[in-house]
């Protein structure tokens, strides 16, 4: 359940809320993400089964995530398969802020 960027989908509140059908967590996550992103996000938007699997995804993950779009367009399993990963501005911010994501991508090779 590692995303294209290396983040662990199983630790994401949208994934957890979907898996457990947890409406309270959907509401809490929608409120937090709305505040962090300064956009309206409703609890019904908080549904995701994982970045790299078939099934429902949050609007951001399915439509707006440039990392996911890039990996899909290149036919990569994750960014860890891409020779440009070390200098990529798309995944760079994630990797700078998450040692775990970088380790996940390196361990998947």
Image: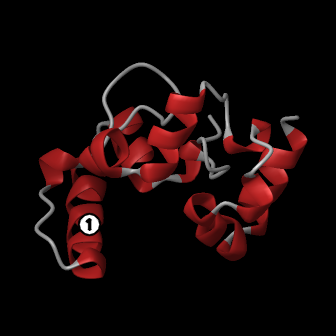
Q: Residue at x 37, y 49 (%)?
A: 14
Q: Residue at x 65, y 67 (%)?
A: 92
Q: Secondary structure at mark 1?
A: helix
Residue 93 in view, yes or no: yes
Which residue, given by chain and number where applicable, does mark 1 sit on?
Answer: 28
Relative to 41, say whether 49 is above or below. Answer: above
Q: Is residue 22 visible?
A: no
Please tell me how many numbered marks the rendered image carries. Answer: 1
The correct choice, above or below, for 74 with respect to 64 in the image is: above
Q: Residue at x 12, y 57 (%)?
A: 42
Instruction: Give percent across and percent down for residue 69.
Output: 44, 40
Image quadrant in which you'd find residue 13: bottom left
The quadrant of the picture occupied by the C terminus is top right
Characterize the local packing of mark 1: few (<14), some (14-19) or many (20 or more) Cα atoms within 10 angstroms: some
Seen in the image, is 88 located left or right of residue 57? right
Q: Quadrant of residue 48?
A: top left
Q: Is residue 32 above or below residue 91?
A: below
Position of 62 relative to 41 (above/below): above
Q: How is the image coloured?
A: secondary structure
């Amino acid at each position: 359940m590692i995303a294209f960027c290396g983040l662990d989908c199983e630790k994401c509140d949208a994934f957890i809320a979907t898996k457990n059908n947890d409406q309270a967590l959907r509401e809490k996550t929608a409120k937090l993400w709305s505040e962090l992103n300064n956009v309206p996000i409703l609890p019904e938007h908080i549904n995701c089964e994982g970045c790299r699997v078939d099934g429902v995804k949050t609007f951001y993950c399915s439509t707006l995530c440039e990392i996911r779009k890039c990996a899909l367009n290149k036919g990569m399993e994750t960014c860890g398969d891409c020779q440009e990963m070390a200098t990529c501005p798309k995944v760079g911010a994630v990797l700078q802020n998450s040692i775990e994501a970088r380790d996940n991508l390196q361990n998947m090779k």
